[in-house]
Image (cartoon, coloured by chain):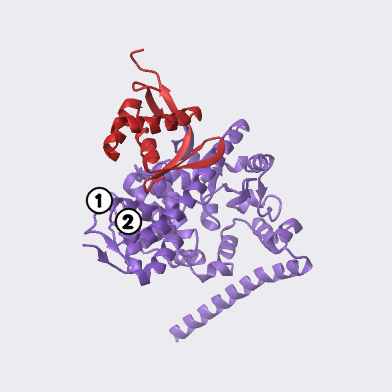
């Protein structure tokens, strides 16, 4: 995952967002994960395609934190979502 | 400034939260001593999703403690909904493999099509409509998938002739209500539910397209469910009616045609009257013709069988008996009520011979009460004539 990686939520997950939190689970079964605070914000932001760089920049502004700090925390979270196929890396149209 | 209002008023405002065109004068709350009434009201009316949405957006202003209580409860509801949706997707595959066409009714179909956010519309089970000709096959498919039917068929052939639906429970503990028509009793018999399959649309769930009633069918079902689903409707059922009208694309001609042909005018009118009484909101002009006629006494008596204490005294069964066409079919209906199969009895009563004897007294009691009701009515008519 780098700044230019284009990311979006997979359409094949089941989810609900409310009261600043998001509940997410796979369509085939499994437990429901609960995202709160910034994790829920990331999940909501990824409803539309965004680059990792955009995502970290938005969060850094929203939470008033240095962007490199955001990247340090965000990267493993996003990687985990990709590994579970809940978030997809979208090939860049220019590639 | 936050206005402190009565719980009943707060529930009415929450019930209309987010309806297009409905505004709010300002934030509202209830006093701490009235909080239990609001809490219980929201649960009883199944309006937790709308309450959380109203908390998020601002109109509903509660203490952190009360807010947490509502959100925590809603989280449990949403976890259940997600589990039910997993079950729905799994069943969709199973039905597709068996080549059984089905339509998703109510909960997920409404939540993902006419509500602006699925979290506004919690649900507690999955309702699937299948064609009557596919009923048995659909039951077998569910059983093969490990589902248990909660109550067996009273007598062979009862379901497809007189029944509305059968509740099945999945191994995960989720309830699946398999329907062959939309409502129990005479109105269910007068409908031609297979026609609903000609007017369906799709909604997306986890990237998969599932069939639902089109908006006109959703409105019809929402009205039927609100007016006849139980003695008094939940706030959520009334909101469904309002939501489909506000957000759906209704084919007025098709709606009127169904209402007329399936004798549903009193039902639809009742649903609209109940909703308007609850919210004080006006109805679109195209619905007004339904309010013009007050309905015949026979219609009102039939509605009473669903919507008064007669419901729990065999009102629907007696009304069904009158609606079943043909003496032979009526006898079969009575036989199923009076002398159901032993599997049905053991599930229903969990006792032996006493249960069967008691079963016999139940419909006899209904008939006795119905006779005495008719008798007392004719006596009062006589008195009036004198």
Label 1 marks which chain's residue?
B
| Residue occupying the point 44% across, 83% down | B384
Residue B302 or B201: which is nearer the viewer?
Answer: B201
Residue at which label 2 appears: B16
Residue at which label 1 appears: B21
- In the picture, which quadrant includes the N terminus of chain B? bottom left
Q: Is residue B218 above or below residue A69?
A: below
Residue A78 in view (yes/no): yes
Label 2 marks which chain's residue?
B
Q: Is B322 on the left-hand or right-hand side of B280?
A: right
Q: Is residue B237 above or below residue B93?
A: below
Helix, strand or loop for disc 1: loop
> Residue B159: x and y, percent?
64, 50
| Residue occupying the point 63% across, 41% down | B138
Chain A shade: red
Q: Which chain is purple?
A: B
**Structural crowding at the residue carrying mark 1, measured as other residues with C-alpha within 10 Å and reported as few (<14), some (14–19) or many (≥20):** few
Q: Residue furthest top?
A: A95
């Amino acid at each position: 995952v780098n700044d230019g990686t284009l990311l979006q939520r997979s359409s094949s997950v089941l989810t609900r967002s409310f009261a600043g939190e998001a509940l997410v689970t796979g369509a085939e079964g499994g437990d429901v994960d609960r995202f709160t605070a910034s994790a829920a914000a990331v999940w909501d932001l990824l409803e539309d395609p965004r680059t990792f760089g955009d995502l970290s920049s938005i969060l850094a502004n929203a939470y008033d934190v240095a962007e490199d700090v955001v990247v340090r925390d965000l990267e493993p979270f996003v990687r985990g979502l990709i590994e579970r196929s809940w978030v997809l890396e979208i090939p860049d149209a220019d590639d | 400034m936050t206005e402190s209002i009565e719980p009943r008023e707060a529930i009415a405002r929450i019930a209309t939260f987010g309806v297009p065109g409905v505004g709010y004068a300002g934030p509202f709350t209830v006093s701490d001593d009235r909080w239990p009434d609001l809490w219980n009201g929201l649960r009883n009316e199944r309006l937790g999703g709308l309450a959380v949405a109203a908390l998020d957006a601002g109109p509903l202003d509660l203490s952190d403690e009360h807010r947490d209580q509502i959100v925590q409860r809603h989280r449990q509801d949403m976890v259940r909904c997600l589990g039910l949706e997993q079950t729905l997707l799994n069943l969709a595959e199973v039905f597709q493999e068996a080549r059984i066409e089905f339509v998703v009714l109510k909960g997920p179909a409404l939540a993902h099509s006419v509500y602006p956010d699925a979290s506004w519309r919690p649900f507690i089970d999955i309702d699937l409509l299948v064609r009557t000709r596919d009923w048995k096959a659909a039951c077998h498919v569910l059983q093969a998938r490990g589902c248990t039917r909660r109550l067996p068929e009273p007598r062979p052939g009862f379901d497809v002739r007189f029944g509305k639906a059968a509740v099945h429970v999945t191994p995960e503990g989720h309830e699946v209500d398999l329907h062959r028509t939309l409502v129990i009793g005479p109105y269910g018999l007068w409908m031609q539910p297979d026609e609903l399959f000609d007017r369906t649309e799709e909604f997306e769930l986890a990237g998969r397209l599932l069939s639902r009633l089109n908006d006109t069918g959703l409105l019809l079902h929402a009205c039927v469910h609100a007016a006849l689903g139980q003695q008094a409707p939940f706030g959520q059922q009334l909101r469904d009616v309002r939501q489909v009208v506000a957000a759906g694309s209704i084919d007025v001609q098709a709606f009127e045609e169904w209402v007329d042909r399936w004798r549903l005018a009193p039902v639809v009118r009742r649903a609209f009257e109940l909703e308007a009484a609850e919210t004080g909101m006006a109805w679109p002009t195209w619905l007004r013709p339904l309010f013009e006629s007050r309905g015949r006494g026979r219609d009102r008596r039939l509605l009473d069988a669903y919507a008064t204490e007669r419901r729990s005294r065999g009102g629907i069964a007696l009304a069904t008996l009158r609606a079943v066409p043909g003496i032979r079919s009526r006898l079969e209906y009575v036989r199923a009520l009076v002398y159901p199969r032993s599997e049905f009895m053991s599930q229903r009563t969990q006792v032996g011979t006493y249960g069967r004897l008691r079963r016999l007294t139940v419909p006899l009691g209904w008939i006795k009460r119905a006779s005495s009701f008719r008798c007392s009515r004719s006596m009062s008519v006589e008195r009036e004539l004198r």
